[in-house]
Amino acid sequence: MKKIKILAIVGSLREGSLNRQLANTAKEVIGDRADFELLDYSDVPLLNQDIEYPAPEAVKRVREAVKSSDGIWFFSPEYNHFFPGVLKNLIDWLSRPISETEPQVLAGKPAAVSGISPGMSGTGLAQDHLVTLISFLNMDIMNAPRLTIPNAMQQTDEKGNLELKASYPYLKKQADAFLSFIEKRI
């Protein structure tokens, strides 16, 4: 049987972001049950129809990563009750048809959503907006369980490194559920 391939998309470009750390923790939870890759999209330009065809190399690369994955796991912070603009820009590129004969790459792709934030909402509002968008793009969304982790600083060490405590079992539950969700679709 083919090994499942999960592509993690983190909504923050910051190397030490809590959501990147959460994605890396999810990778550890997944272990050898699936291939788990974090997408680097820091070089994707702002969407501009003047450069859409042919797409920039960075866009081609991220499209290929999405196409070759079995599922997409979003890890996003919440900025002003929404997900970050860099994530919206990436999704905008991914939502565009590749050519007149090739459709966009997100349709039908299984998706899970997680997030951690220092505030009380735990990224719940951002996740709702993200789910609205990716639902419109016809992704196959695992709506439950979702993971929203509030009060992030209660689960970090003195250097700001994530040390999930109370939320760890919920991350494990979501990882197990997402693997099962994907397996039923491939």
Image: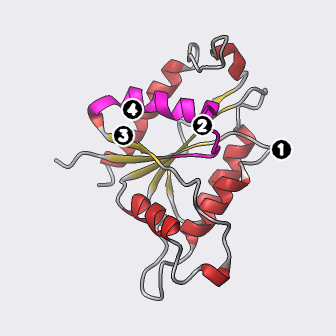
Q: Circle 1 sits on which residue? A: 80
The residues tagged by marks 1 and 4 sit, at their Cα atoms, a distance apart of 31 Å
Q: Which residue is mark 3?
A: 179
Q: Is residue 61 visible?
A: yes
Q: Amino acid at mark 1?
A: Asn
Q: Which mark is residue 15?
A: 2
Residue lying at 71% horizontally and 52% vertically, measured from the top left: 129
Answer with mark 1 or mark 4, whichever residue precedes in sequence.
1
Q: Residue furthest right?
A: 80
Q: Are marks 3 and 4 in contact (CB under 8 Å)?
A: yes
Along the line of sight, the residue nearer the viewer: 132 or 154? 154
Residue 145 to residue 157: above or below: below
Where residue 78 appears, as percent x and y from the top left, is 74, 41
Q: Say which residue label 4 marks.
A: 176
> How busy is the neighbourhood of tag 2: few (under 14 within 10 Å), some, or many (20 plus)?
few
Question: Which element is circle 4 on?
Answer: helix
Expressed as whole percent of the image width and height from the top left, the position of residue 114 reads 58, 38
Task: Report, in whole angstroms, how far the alpha carbon at label 1 lies from the one at label 3.
Answer: 31 Å
Of badges 2 and 1, the one in the foreground is 2
Magenta part of the protein: which range? 9-32
* C-alpha distance separating marks 2 and 4: 26 Å
Q: Earlier in the sequence, mark 1 or mark 3?
A: 1
